Amino acid sequence: MRILIAEDDEVLADGLSNSMRHSGYAVDCVRDGQAAKLILSGEQPFDLVILDLGLPKLDGFSVLRCLRESNRQVPVIILTARDGEGDRVKGLDLGADDYMIKPFSLPELEARVRALIRRGQCGMNPVYSCGKLTFDSVARRTMIDGIPLELTTRELSVLEALMLRTGWVVSKEQLLERLYSYSEEASNNAIEVYIHRLRKKVEPAGVTIRTIRGLGYVIDNLLQPAN
């Protein structure tokens, strides 16, 4: 899952980015409103936006207004030092899903992020299964027969992308989009390394990750005939 952080305070932005990446999210970070507007109008989908109001070039209210006028329903958490009732009402009326005041509790912000992603998956089963392997997309937890499977954050993101499309091919490009922000350098070789590690870890669950030459990868249940 991918999160956009629009925050002009460099120290805070870096801290939030590191925290969200540690939780297994791919994170893009912008420092002004024009950049936020541009990236949100592009083709790259985001699962959530953390938005400061006091952005240079274009304020957070304007970014939010443009986002909602384009009919994009990505959840938005406003994270700001503005604690006035009028600002809170305006933000929520413009389409924000949550409003938090700085200074804030990082564990609370992380919990609100999980809650909004869960709400966005309303009507969908957040738990995906393949063989004896299960993945909870909200809790971001993987288990084999109820026993937690230890994965790095990158491995978890790769597994998530594969399990969301069990039985279907996922390309290297799609995996790279989930793992890395625009500012990070990545290579196809990195994906191959994560796939190699995952294969060893998921085989005890009766699961295989097959390479489809020239196309990408597909996760299958070894206990059933592959389609």
Image: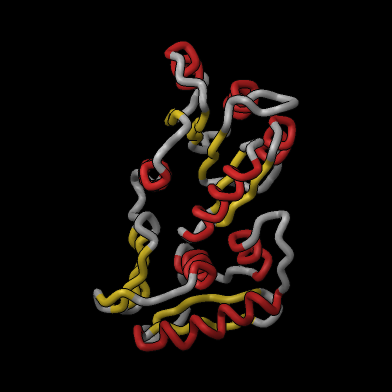
Residue at 71 percent of width and 33 percent of height: 32
Q: Position of residue 23 (x, y in %)?
A: 46, 58
175 vs 131, nearest the viewer: 175
Q: Position of residue 147 (x, y in %)?
A: 27, 77
19 vs 151, nearest the viewer: 19
Q: Quadrant of residue 131?
A: bottom left
Above-or-below relation of 110 to 173: above
Q: Position of residue 41 (x, y in %)?
A: 69, 36
Residue at 40 percent of width and 80 percent of height: 221
Residue at 62 percent of width and 37 percent of height: 7
Residue at 49 percent of width and 60 percent of height: 22
Q: Quadrant of residue 65?
A: top right
Locate residue 65 relative to residue 130 in the image: left or right: right
Locate residue 197 relative to residue 132 in the image: left or right: right
Above-or-below relation of 126 to 123: below
Q: Position of residue 190 (x, y in %)?
A: 66, 76
Judge whether residue 77 can be spotted in this image. Answer: yes
Residue lying furthest top = 86
